[in-house]
Image (cartoon, rainbow, N blue to C red):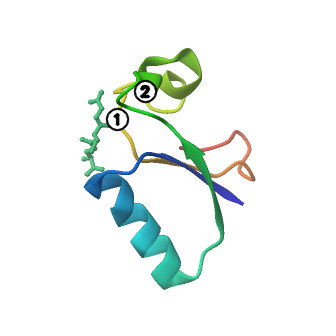
Amino acid sequence: MLEVWTWSTPNGHKVHIALEELGIPYKVIPIDIGAGDQFKPEFLKINPNHRIPAIVDPSSNPPRS
Ligand SMILES: N[C@@H](CCC(=O)N[C@@H](CS)C(=O)NCC(=O)O)C(=O)O
């Protein structure tokens, strides 16, 4: 299942709208950009430019973001 690393902002909402419209299942991983979660190493591994939203496909080998 796709992972959506995101927060409640207009850029974050765009991804939910698209995935819901397409009927693609996904799991949300909240990244509180107000608290600085986007600078944590676990998120920077996914998106080094520290911006949400980011989508990860864990079924890919290696996982793609
Ligand atoms: N081009 C990106 C822009 C994403 C973006 O600017 N995200 C902002 C929140 S809406 C962000 O993560 N800001 C945190 C930061 O820059 O550290 C998109 O449209 O999704």
Query: Alpha-carbon neighbours of circle 1 within 10 Å: few (<14), some, or many (≥20)?
Result: some
- Name the kind of residue labelled 1 in the image: Arg
Left or right, residue 15 beside residue 2 = left
Describe the element under mark 2 as helix, strand or loop. helix
Where 20 sits versus 10, above or below?
below
Q: Are marks 1 and 2 in contact (CB under 8 Å)?
A: yes
Name the residue rendered at 74%, 44% in the picture.
61
Q: Which of the labelled discs sits on residue 10, or is there none?
A: none
Q: How many marks?
A: 2
Name the residue rendered at 70%, 39% in the picture.
62
Where 63 sits versus 48, above or below?
below
Query: Alpha-carbon neighbours of circle 2 within 10 Å: few (<14), some, or many (≥20)?
Result: many
Question: Which residue is under mark 1?
Answer: 51
Q: Position of residue 7 (x, y in %)?
A: 42, 46
Question: Does the residue tagged 1 have its C-beta within 8 Å of any atom of ligand 1?
Answer: yes
- Name the kind of residue labelled 2 in the image: Gln
Name the residue rendered at 65%, 71% in the picture.
25
Name the residue rendered at 54%, 16% in the picture.
41
Left or right, residue 43 beside residue 12 = right
Q: Residue furthest front?
A: 35
Question: Does the residue tagged 2 have its C-beta within 8 Å of any atom of ligand 1?
Answer: yes
Describe the element under mark 1 as helix, strand or loop. loop
Q: Position of residue 33 (x, y in %)?
A: 37, 31
Q: Which of the labelled discs sits on residue 38, or is there none?
A: 2
Q: Quadrant of ligand 1?
A: top left
